Amino acid sequence: MRSTTHPWAPKISPDVAWVSVDGEVVAIDPIAGDIHLINSTGALLWSLFDGTATVAELATDIADVFEIALDDAFDQVNSFASRMVEASLVVGPEVREQSDVGVRAAGGDDPEVAPTNGPLYLVKPPDP
């Protein structure tokens, strides 16, 4: 993996109200008044966005658990986290000290993320 000097650890914005419902997340941005539905795959990542683990560290864990390629996991985690930042749901990117885990700049095609009828963010689940 290529290295970058700006690893970041996503963290749910303290301004966002959210609740987990049937394995999915409903998040409300009170400033913009937007309601976002995050599917179960995104909800798994959402629950890990506490500002302590970098995108690369999260991707490593996801790759191990779902037995997918690390590059694919990184692309999906980075894309989802970046979209959550764009939607003002997640704070970042915040720079953290370089860890033992390699970090790379995102590249290639984004995973399937589909907005429909307003802000709805879906991340393609890993293949079984």
Image (cartoon, rainbow, N blue to C red):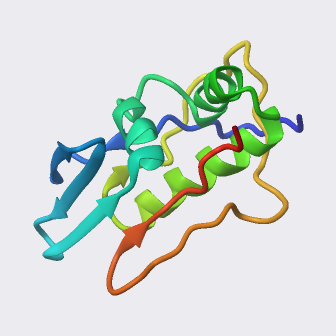
Q: Position of residue 109 (x, y in %)?
A: 80, 65
Quarter of the image where one finds residue 117: bottom left
Q: Nearer the viewer, residue 20 or 34?
A: 20
Q: Position of residue 17 (x, y in %)?
A: 12, 52
Look at the image and tell me in which quarter the C terminus lies.
top right
- Residue at x-position 85% and y-position 61%: 108
Q: Position of residue 98 (x, y in %)?
A: 68, 22
Up-down relation of residue 22 to residue 32 (above or below): above
Up-down relation of residue 65 to residue 19 (above or below): above
Q: Is residue 104 left or right of residue 41?
A: right
Q: Position of residue 16 (x, y in %)?
A: 18, 53
- Residue at x-position 73% and y-position 12%: 100
Q: Residue furthest right?
A: 2
Up-down relation of residue 39 to residue 36 (above or below): above
Q: Residue furthest top?
A: 100
Q: Is residue 9 left or right of residue 17?
A: right
Q: Nearer the viewer, residue 3 or 127?
A: 127
Q: Please tell me how many numbered marks the rendered image carries.
A: 0
